[in-house]
Image (spheres, helix red, strand yellow):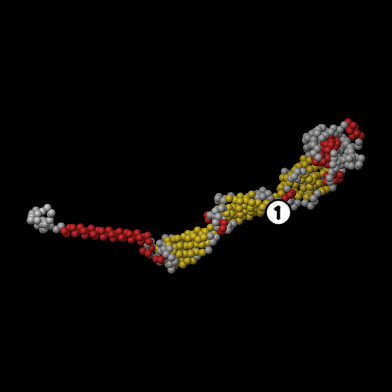
């Protein structure tokens, strides 16, 4: 393997003495005419081989890094040989770009440990601080273009010489790979051209803005990206940005009609569905409702790679009270400024619930065009109405017209109980209403008496007749007793003979006077 000669400092020690300014010196070559790699290439090779770098904050621009693990102090002989050699100059721009893009030679770890401290620069080195500004996170949507900002900010009094800009992508499995390189004279280079572009960097101009545009965003573009400036003689500076790739979901909500067989089960059944399609990351769905319901959620792959479709089913036990009520599906996603509200009107299947209206308790004989209505809550809709009375068919003056019963003229036959029977596909229900017909003066007519009233009147009449018969009998009995007790006009009391068992048959009756 060829031996690389040591770099000789010129005009001072430290980083400036080891990596000479571009305007001074010539490229130092080895016996096989190989160029000495740039400081940026050496530091990159050292990172990949795990060679430790000097600690941050170690000395100023002319300070020599202290010895430590992986660093060997040069001998005095080596120092004398360095003084006899011509001053080195920084590698050309063409050689720097080519070494960054192609596979670099496998430098011995010991040599890298010697050379890597020569290219290390701390933020406080030199006359000021060189910084790289980049946001912590950038968001973009699938299929759109996202720009990763990256700006170099040298101190006002310092004009840093940028030799190369590299964008690295951190892989989920570990490690990093180069996705874009920009050289000050040769321009951009991309391992996978077509979707990446440097927004502001132009060949031949000062390289300060290394912002990178990523076109036609895909889900796999989401990663951590590092923007790295290689400068001479300061070394390298970098900043990292997280690229988030989003997809705004499409949302819809609807009411569900459950098959009749499902309602026969006591288990809750789904009555509403809310779908958030093609979101990245998956959307969050909730049902803010006072109803006693539960939600079952599932996720399936979305229409585009990397997206997810979320399906939420609202379930509850069958109850006609929930039919027609409104519930709300709420969808939250980081691409929304506020949650999306989707109202849903529930459709709960149930048998008919029937009531009769239209009777105002003022139906009198001769009234015309009276109407009864059969009011129904039914889902599905009723399939038929049937009007009748407790006595059988409708009176001649009553005509059924679907849910309405029209009475042309109120007569004694209308004084009855009407029945409305309603049927739908889930069952049949009915309601009853008793009509009391009054006379022309407003009083109830005899025909309007109910069976109960007639029975009560009958009992009262029978009781009255019985009482009257008892009084007549009592008076007759009393008069009969008075007729049998009749005294003489002169006050003489006559007694009739009384046969006593103790008396003698020879005894004669006696008379007495009062």
Q: Is residue 216 visible?
A: yes
> Extreme bottom residue here?
396
For residue 229, above or below residue 460: above
**480 or 419: nearer the eye?**
480
Q: Residue at x 80, y 45 (%)?
A: 166
Give the labeled residue for mark 1.
304
Q: Residues within 10 Å of mark 1 (few under 14, many from 20)?
A: some
Examine the image and state in which quarter residue 14 appears.
top right
Judge whether residue 156 can be spotted in this image.
Answer: no
Percent position of residue 436, x then y: 40, 62
Count of residue discs: 1
Of residues 336 and 374, the one nearer the viewer is: 374
Q: In this rendering, would 17 be left or right of 281? A: right
Mark 1 element type: loop
Query: Residue 407: image x %, image y %?
Result: 44, 66
Q: Is residue 135 above or below residue 447?
A: above
Residue at image location 83% in from the left, 48% down from the top: 187
> What residue do we see at 77% from left, 48% from top?
212
Judge left or right: residue 352 versus residue 242: left
The percent position of residue 353, horizontal first and vertical second, equals 50, 58
Relative horizontal placement of residue 399, taking residue 511 as reference (left or right): right
Q: Residue furthest top?
A: 76
Q: Position of residue 361 (x, y in %)?
A: 42, 60
* Quadrant of the drawing holding the N terminus: top right
- Please state if 364 lies on the left or on the right of 11 as rendered: left
């Amino acid at each position: 393997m060829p031996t690389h000669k040591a770099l000789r400092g010129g005009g001072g020690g430290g980083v400036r003495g080891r990596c000479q300014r571009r305007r001074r010196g010539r490229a130092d070559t080895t016996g096989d005419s190989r160029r000495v790699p740039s400081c940026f290439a050496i530091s990159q090779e050292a990172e990949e081989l795990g060679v430790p770098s000097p600690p941050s904050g170690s000395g100023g621009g002319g300070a020599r890094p202290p010895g430590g693990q992986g660093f060997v102090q040069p001998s005095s002989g080596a120092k004398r040989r360095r003084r006899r050699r011509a001053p080195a100059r920084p590698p050309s721009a063409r050689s720097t770009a080519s070494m960054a893009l192609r596979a670099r030679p496998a430098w011995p770890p010991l040599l890298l440990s010697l050379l890597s401290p020569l290219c290390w620069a701390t933020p406080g080195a030199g006359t000021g601080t060189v910084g790289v500004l980049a946001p912590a996170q950038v968001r973009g949507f699938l299929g759109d273009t996202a720009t990763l900002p990256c700006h170099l900010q040298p101190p006002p009094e310092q004009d840093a010489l940028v030799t190369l800009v590299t964008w690295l992508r951190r892989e989920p499995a570990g490690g990093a790979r180069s996705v874009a390189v920009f050289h000050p004279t040769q321009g951009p280079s991309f391992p996978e051209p077509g979707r990446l572009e440097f927004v502001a960097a132009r060949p031949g101009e000062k390289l300060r803005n290394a912002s990178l545009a990523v076109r036609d965003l895909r889900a796999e573009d989401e990663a951590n990206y590092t923007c790295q400036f290689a400068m001479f003689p300061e070394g390298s500076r970098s900043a990292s940005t997280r690229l988030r790739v989003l997809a705004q979901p499409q949302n819809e909500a609807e009411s569900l009609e459950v098959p009749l067989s499902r309602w026969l089960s006591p288990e809750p059944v789904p009555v509403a569905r809310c779908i958030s399609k093609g979101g990245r990351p998956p959307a969050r769905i909730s049902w803010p409702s006072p109803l006693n319901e539960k939600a079952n959620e599932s996720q399936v792959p979305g229409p585009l790679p990397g997206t997810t479709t979320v399906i939420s089913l609202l379930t509850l036990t069958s109850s006609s009270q929930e039919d027609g009520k409104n519930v709300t599906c709420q969808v939250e996603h980081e691409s929304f400024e506020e949650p999306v509200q989707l109202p849903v009107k529930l459709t709960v299947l149930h048998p008919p619930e029937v009531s009769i209206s239209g009777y105002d308790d003022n139906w009198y004989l001769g009234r015309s065009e009276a109407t009864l209505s059969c009011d129904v809550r039914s889902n599905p809709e009723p399939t038929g109405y049937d009007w009748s009375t407790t006595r059988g068919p409708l009176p001649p003056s009553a005509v059924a017209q679907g849910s309405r019963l029209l009475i042309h003229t109120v007569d004694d036959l209308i004084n009855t109980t009407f029945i409305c029977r309603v049927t739908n596909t889930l069952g049949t229900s009915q309601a009853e209403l008793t009509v009391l017909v009054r006379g022309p003066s407003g009083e109830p007519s005899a025909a309007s008496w109910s069976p109960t009233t007639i029975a009560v009147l009958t009992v009262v009449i029978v009781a009255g007749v019985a009482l009257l018969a008892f009084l007549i009998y009592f008076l007759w009995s009393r008069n009969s007793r008075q007729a049998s007790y009749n005294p003489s006009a002169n006050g003489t009391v006559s007694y009739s003979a009384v046969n006593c068992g103790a008396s003698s048959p020879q005894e004669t009756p006696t008379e007495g006077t009062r």
